[in-house]
Amino acid sequence: MKNTQTKDIESNEKVKKEDFPGNISTLLNRDYYIKVGKADTLLKEINIMTKDGKIKNDKVRKYNQIDHYVELLSEILDNLPRNKTINILDCGCGKSYLSFVLNYYFTEVKKENAILLV
């Protein structure tokens, strides 16, 4: 890994990438909801990550988009009833990145029962 420096927005100090723990995604110097290292199987299946565990250069924007989607929904999701199955109706189109990510977030991160209806 190159000795690349990024700027820590909160403390205004320069930090090196190797200063971050290996299990936290830090592409934009922030903690992600969909973490590299924990969501590798998902990220590989939706073609955002290479087989060797790196986010593809041409998919960095998509990775940020899907993570921001979860960030926007996280407060709503946190206020849903616990111990009940949540039904999610997805009326989207395309490659279903957001659907797969939302399903992953519910079942693997939040450990909630969810049924995704597409």
Image: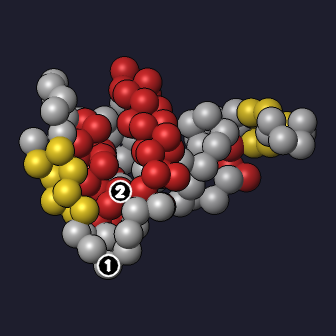
Labelled disc at residue 52? none
User: Height in image: 81 above or below 47?
Assistant: below
Disc 1 secondary structure class? loop
Give the labeled residue for mark 2: 105
Mark 2 neighbour class, 10 Å CA radius: few under 14, some 14 to 19, many 20 or more: many
Q: Residue 60 at what x, y percent from top left?
A: 43, 28
Q: Is residue 91 visible?
A: yes
User: Height in image: 90 above or below 59?
Assistant: below
Q: Earlier in the sequence, mark 1 or mark 2?
A: 1
Residue at 37% over, 21% down: 58
Relative side of 101 to 22, left or right: left
Residue at 38% over, 69% down: 81
Give the labeled residue for mark 1: 83
**For the residues marked 1 and 2, what is the alpha-carbon distance in whole angstroms?**
16 Å
Q: Residue 45 at what x, y percent from top left?
A: 19, 45
Q: Can residue 111 be seen in this view?
A: no
Q: Residue 20 at what x, y percent from top left?
A: 68, 53
Q: What residue type is labelled 1?
A: Asn
Of residues 22 and 81, the one nearer the viewer is 81
Among all residues in the image, which is located at the extreme right? 12
Relative side of 65 to 75, left or right: left
Q: Quadrant of the N terminus?
A: top right
Q: What residue type is labelled 2?
A: Tyr
Mark 1 neighbour class, 10 Å CA radius: few under 14, some 14 to 19, many 20 or more: few
Residue at 30% over, 47% down: 101
Of residues 53 and 39, the one nearer the viewer is 39
